[in-house]
Amino acid sequence: MAAWERPAFDQPFELWREEGVLHLVLAKGAHVRGKHMKEFIRLVAALDNTGRSPVVMEYAEQVVVEDGARALLRRVCGANGHPVALFAVDANGQAQAEMFKHMERPAFPFRVFLERGSALVWARERRQLTELAKPS
C-alpha cells in the first residue's frame, strides 16, 4: 500500500513570467504567512534580477495575508521595487489591499484593481515605461 507523501511544494500561490510581467495567483482561501512571503520574494528575484518587472497579483476569495507578511513585503521591496497591480476578486480582498496601501505605505508603485484586465494594462504600461527609461 502506497503511503501518502506531503507535496514537494507547500506554497499558497503560483508564480510565472509572461511577456515581461510576473503573475502571482494566490490560492482560494490561502493563509499567507511570513515564510510564504519570503519564498515569494525569493522566486520573484530569481525570475527577474533587475527588480523592475511589474507583478500582477490575483487575490482570490477568502485570502488572508498576515500582518508580518505584509510588513516584510513593504520592508524588502523598497523604493526601486517591482510595481504591483493587485486584482482583488472579492470585497474582503479589496479591503485588505486598500488597508495595506494606506497602513504600510509601500514605496514601490502599488495599485488595487477590481478587474483583471485593468490590472494587466497598468502592469504592461509600467513595463513599457521601464523599457523607455533604459539607457541605450
Image (spheres, grey):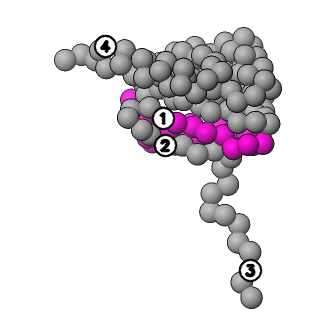
**Label 3 or label 1, whichever comes before in sequence order:** 3
Q: Name the residue under label 4.
A: 133
Which residue is found at the position 67% from the left and 54% from the top? Answer: 10
Cα separation between marks 4 and 1: 19 Å
Q: Give the range drawn in magenta.
A: 22-51
**Label 3 or label 2, whichever comes before in sequence order:** 3
Q: Which of marks 2 and 4 is in front?
A: 2
Image side of residue 124 versus residue 9, left or right: left
Q: Residue 77 lies in what quarter of the image?
A: top right
Q: Mark 1 points at which residue?
A: 22
Of 122 and 71, nearer the camera is 122
Percent coordinates x, y for residue 95 in the rendering: 78, 20
**Amino acid type, residue under disc 1 in the picture:** Leu
SS for callout 3: loop
Cα separation between marks 2 and 4: 24 Å
Contact between marks 2 and 4 (CB within 8 A): the answer is no
Q: Residue 34 lies in what quarter of the image?
A: top right
Cα separation between marks 3 and 2: 31 Å
Q: Mark 3 points at which residue?
A: 3
Q: Which of marks 4 and 1 is in front?
A: 1
